[in-house]
Image (cartoon, grey):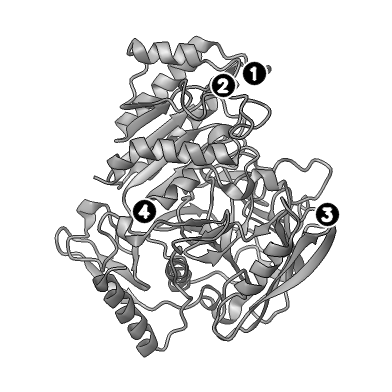
């Protein structure tokens, strides 16, 4: 850390103390996160010069709007106006996420302090030691920090190849609404992913389906509540409306529940909601995979959603009534049709409030999340990935897919729109989300990787259509202002590698950058190498995703770091 940076952080800390506000412990990733732990985001100094206070020229020309937030060094600002060359940004105090709604908070829990003054249990975790389950309670101490020493002891004692799973998340709001893991499906890990140095509750495809059950004591009006998370989402496109990620409020199948989910059956990448009016309503919001507070507020006039500085509304009067209990995670009904969990949800906190929040309260939550997780809503560079399971992270634990891992190298807004099973026809449906997040962006970079699923039984998409679809995707992304990088196909049997390579050579496919991490002689060339590939010879394993992240970043990083 430079002397200038140290002075800035010290001034921020002193200002917060003088204001008497309760702030979360903003931190950064240590030089060595320890073991196989992944920590994002990259250092603030990789944010393209935005690790500073906002200026008058941070205006509408640079893509900012009134109400936007800016965070640097533990301080936060809100754009009062963004007039050309005369933008005005006002300092806003940072509280804790669970304090944003005062006494209306009915649940606040996670591996960080979310409610000011809270000291006590945060999580119960289970580890396997000599084949037996050992339960450990991790507490938040008087310094406001999780007892990571106890976590490290539990992790070091576990059986080789096992994880620490979260069994219970304690309610810091004082209401006793603790949430518990789905019986028999303890799949949420801790100790694998950190956000700005904080431990997270992490899901992933290899974790399997499951989540947390909300007790009936969590009661909210269907036309007045708030649900929010701090941390990250490793995928912006879960792709199945039956998967209530991030939340279901009420009882599944009752006809009086609320769900928020991403992508729906159309795999479109937008956040969708379901309520008694309709089982599937698309909003205009795309959740970023970079650190950002996500929230959905319900009021009599409809929904307001936010992820970072992106906002969307879904107007219309909401039905009254009460939603009691619910579910956070995958497959809310707990029935026999449990499907594979998607790569989404690496959270430092979960907050539920029992009333329709005011704009100031919703902003207070967003500010709290930005400060706690060193999120930078002001980032303007955009990276979008479009593809299938090789990009979403099939059978990868805790969301550690290659686009997520690349966030260790620089600060930018990342959106992973890939979905397991997607064909190039599905990938065409992801373009509106990519076009939406491009608006207001500075440098825009898209990475496209797909085509293998087209030939599978049930799809039967001809190779010439695969090439045409990829050409359309490339062209539309260019029209949206993206520099487009196309990853050539793998050496997997049945993959249209030769056809795509030939189309590039003939100019039918015209990406700005062509990437071939599977070329002969490169580490991922041999799909039979089980140190880097799963035995199915189709999907890179965790080591393979690490190699992909390094390879892709080596070729596209200079574009974002100009």
Q: Which quadrant holds the N terminus?
A: bottom left
Q: Write down the residue under mark 4.
A: 411
Query: Which x, y percent locates residue 491?
Result: 54, 19
- Which secondary structure, mark 3? loop
Q: Are marks 3 and 4 in contact (CB under 8 Å)?
A: no
Which residue corresponds to mark 1?
Answer: 456
Image coordinates for residue 410, horizontal then vertical, percent: 36, 51
Query: Mark 1 to mark 3: distance in Å?
Result: 33 Å
Count up the numbered dots: 4
Instruction: Tell me whether circle 2 and circle 1 mark residues in contact (CB < 8 Å).
Output: yes
Q: Which of the labelled discs sits on residue 452, or is there none?
A: 2
Q: Nearer the viewer, residue 151 or 111?
A: 151
Residue 47, image quadrant: bottom left
Q: Position of residue 156 (x, y in %)?
A: 68, 63
Would residue 65 be found to the left or right of residue 85 on screen?
A: right
Instruction: Please tell me which residue is depicted at 62% across the width and 54% down the height of the picture.
Output: 246
Q: Does label 1 or label 4 sit earlier along the sequence?
A: 4
Q: Is residue 120 left or right of residue 492?
A: right
Give the number of the mark in front: 1 or 4: 4
> 430 and 409: which one is in front?
409
Give the distance between the C-alpha atoms of the residues marked 2 and 1, in whole angstroms: 8 Å
Taking the spot 53% from the left edge, 39% from the top edge, the residue there is 545
Q: Between residues 512 and 322, which one lies in front from this camera angle?
A: 512
Query: Mark 3 — residue?
Result: 184
Q: Is residue 90 above or below residue 515?
A: below
Query: Of helix, strand and loop, which one carries label 2?
Result: helix
């Amino acid at each position: 850390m430079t002397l200038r940076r140290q002075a800035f952080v010290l001034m921020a800390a002193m200002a917060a103390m003088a204001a008497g506000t309760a702030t979360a412990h903003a931190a950064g990733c240590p030089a060595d996160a320890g073991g196989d732990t992944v920590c994002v985001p990259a250092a603030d100094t990789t944010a393209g010069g935005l690790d500073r206070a906002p200026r008058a020229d941070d205006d509408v020309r640079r893509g900012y709007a009134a109400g936007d937030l800016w965070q640097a060094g533990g301080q936060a600002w809100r754009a009062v106006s963004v007039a050309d060359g005369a933008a005005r940004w006002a300092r806003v105090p940072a509280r804790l996420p669970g304090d944003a709604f005062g006494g209306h908070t009915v649940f606040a829990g996670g591996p960080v302090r979310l409610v000011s003054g809270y000291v006590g249990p945060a999580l119960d975790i289970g580890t396997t030691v000599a084949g037996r389950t050992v339960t450990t309670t991790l507490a938040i101490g008087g310094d406001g920090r999780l007892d990571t020493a106890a976590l490290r002891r539990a992790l070091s004692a576990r059986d080789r190849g096992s994880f620490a799973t979260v069994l219970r998340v304690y309610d810091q709001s004082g209401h006793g609404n603790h949430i518990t893991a789905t019986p028999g499906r303890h799949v949420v890990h801790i100790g694998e992913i950190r956000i700005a140095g904080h431990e997270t509750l992490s899901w992933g495809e290899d974790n399997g389906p499951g989540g947390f059950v909300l007790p009936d004591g969590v009661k909210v009006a269907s036309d007045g509540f708030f649900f929010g998370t701090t941390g990250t989402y490793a995928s912006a496109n879960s792709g199945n409306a039956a998967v209530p990620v991030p939340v279901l409020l009420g009882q599944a199948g009752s006809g009086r529940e609320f769900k928020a989910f991403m992508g729906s059956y159309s795999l479109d990448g937008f956040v969708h909601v379901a309520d008694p009016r309709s089982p599937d309503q698309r909003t205009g919001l795309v959740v970023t995979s970079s650190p950002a507070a996500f929230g959905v507020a319900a009021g009599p006039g409809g929904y307001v959603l936010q992820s970072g500085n992106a906002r969307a509304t879904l107007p219309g009067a909401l039905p009254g009534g009460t939603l009691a209990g619910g579910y956070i995670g995958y497959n809310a009904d707990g029935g026999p049709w449990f499907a594979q969990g998607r790569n989404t949800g690496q959270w430092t906190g979960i907050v539920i409030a029992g009333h329709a929040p005011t704009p100031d309260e919703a902003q207070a939550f967003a500010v709290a999340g930005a400060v706690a997780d060193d999120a930078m809503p002001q980032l303007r560079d955009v990276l979008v990935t479009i593809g299938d399971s090789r990009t979403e992270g099939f059978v990868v634990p805790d969301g550690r897919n290659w686009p997520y891992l690349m966030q260790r190298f620089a600060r930018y807004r990342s959106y992973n729109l890939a979905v397991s099973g997607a064909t190039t026809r599905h990938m065409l449906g992801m373009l509106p989300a990519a076009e939406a997040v491009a608006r207001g962006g500075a440098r825009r970079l898209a990475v496209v990787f797909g085509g293998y699923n087209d030939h599978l039984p049930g799809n039967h998409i001809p190779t010439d259509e695969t090439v045409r679809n990829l050409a359309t995707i490339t062209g539309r992304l260019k029209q949206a202002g993206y520099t487009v990088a196309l990853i050539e196909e793998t050496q997997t049997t049945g993959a249209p590698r030769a056809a795509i390579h030939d189309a590039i050579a003939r100019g039918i496919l015209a990406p700005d950058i062509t990437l071939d991490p599977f070329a002969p002689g490169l580490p991922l060339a041999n799909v039979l190498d089980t140190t880097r590939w799963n035995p199915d010879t189709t999907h890179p394993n965790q080591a393979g995703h690490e190699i992909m992240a390094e390879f892709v970043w080596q070729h596209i990083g200079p574009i974002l770091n100009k």
